[in-house]
Image (cartoon, grey):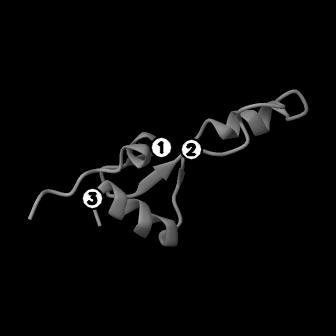
Amino acid sequence: MPKMKTHRGTAKRFRVTGSGKIMRAKAFKSHILTKKSQKRKRNFRNETELSKADAKVVGRNLGIR
């Protein structure tokens, strides 16, 4: 049986921490930024943990679950 291949699109969008959590970037930061407050835009920079339901699918694509 051949090795599993990592889904490259998934690998570019998600990051796995040392403890095994899958992190994702936040949405709504790409355009129409003038009406958004500095605080809101600053919070878009931080990554957040992926939900458990999504982590199952993404983990499979990354070859870790």
User: In whole angstroms, how far apart are the C-alphas of marks 2 and 3?
Assistant: 20 Å
Residue 47: x and y, percent? 55, 44
> Of helix, strand and loop, which one carries label 3?
loop
How far is the residue under mark 2 from the one under mark 1? Answer: 8 Å
- Please report contact status of discs 2 and 1: CB closer than 8 Å, yes or no: yes
Q: Amino acid at mark 1?
A: Arg
Q: Which mark is residue 13?
A: 1
Above or below residue 42? Residue 56 is: below
Q: Position of residue 24 (x, y in %)?
A: 52, 49
**In the rendered image, which quarter is residue 8 located in?**
top left
Write the residue at 42% across / 49% down.
10
Of callouts 2 and 1, the N-terminal one: 1
Q: Which residue is mark 2?
A: 25
Q: Is residue 13 above or below residue 19?
A: above
**Type of amino acid under label 3:** Gly
Check residue 63 in the rendering and tell me which mark sits there, or answer none: 3
In the foreground, 25 or 5: 5
Q: Toward the viewer: 64 or 37? A: 64
Q: Nearer the viewer, mark 2 or mark 1?
A: 1
Picture residue at 82% right of the left edge, 30% below the top: 33
The answer to which of marks 2 and 3 sits earlier in the sequence is: 2
